[in-house]
Image (cartoon, rainbow, N blue to C red):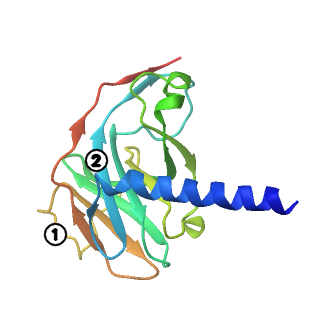
Amino acid sequence: MRSKLAVCFIAALFAGHAIGKTHKHKTKKASANFTFIEAYSQKMTGGPRNSAPRSTGNHFVIVWETASAPETFFWRGDNGFLMCNMEKAHKIGASNMGKYPKGMSYTTQPVMPTDIHPGDTLQLTPVAGGKYPVPAEVSPAIKNTLFYKTGGSNWLSFPVKKITQKNDIQLP
């Protein structure tokens, strides 16, 4: 019993070490609240249709850093002030690439803002399908910026300098 527990503990340490290493080479400290991993544009076509708002094709991957969870994220791009879906993201490892459509980098799962904790990797996806007025505190001239609130804060912002274009994905 003790040896199984010791093996599990060592495996968890190695897994945590490996996860921590995966982000170090491509991250850039964004703010006191999150670390920015990447921004990319990629549309997914086909697959099951539902009545959810449609994605703009832009995706922002961050690692949340603070205990105060984000309340909401918005993207201010060329298409106005768009609400973002927040999902937990998991990078697809090379050994699992064959299980997913070619070109897919992350798997995601829905998450409630109250369930976001420090160290969680999130994918933010702006969605069209709603009319959201630009808050008075946000200058309408500011573009290509993520806006967010945490625990009753004022609007915070993070400008996105580059969005990488990835090949679109055809879902079965």
Name the amino acid, label 2. Ala
Residue marked by disc 2? 39
- Whether residue 171 is situated above or below residue 15 in the rendered picture: above
What is the quadrant of residue 28 in the picture? bottom left
- Whether residue 113 is situated above or below residue 40 in the rendered picture: below
Q: Is residue 83 visible?
A: no
**Pointer 2 local density, CA inside 10 Å: few below 14, some 14–19, many at least 20:** many
Question: Which residue is pictured at 50% across the width and 78% down the height?
Answer: 67
Name the amino acid, label 1. Ser
Left-right relation of 165 to 109? left
Residue 54 in percent (x, y) is at: 42, 37
Left-right relation of 141 to 106? left
Question: Which residue is pictured at 57% across the width and 47% down the height?
Answer: 109
Which badge, 1 or 2, is on the more N-terminal residue?
A: 2
Q: Which mark is residue 139?
A: 1
Of residue 133 and residue 83, the one placed in the foreground of this image is 83
Q: Secondary structure at mark 1?
A: loop
**Pointer 1 local density, CA inside 10 Å: few below 14, some 14–19, many at least 20:** few
What is the quadrant of residue 168 in the picture? top left
Check if mark 1's residue and mark 2's residue have beta carbons within 8 Å: no
**Disc 1 versus disc 2: distance between alpha carbons?**
22 Å
Question: Which residue is pictured at 23% across the width and 46% down the height?
Answer: 79
Q: Residue furthest right?
A: 1
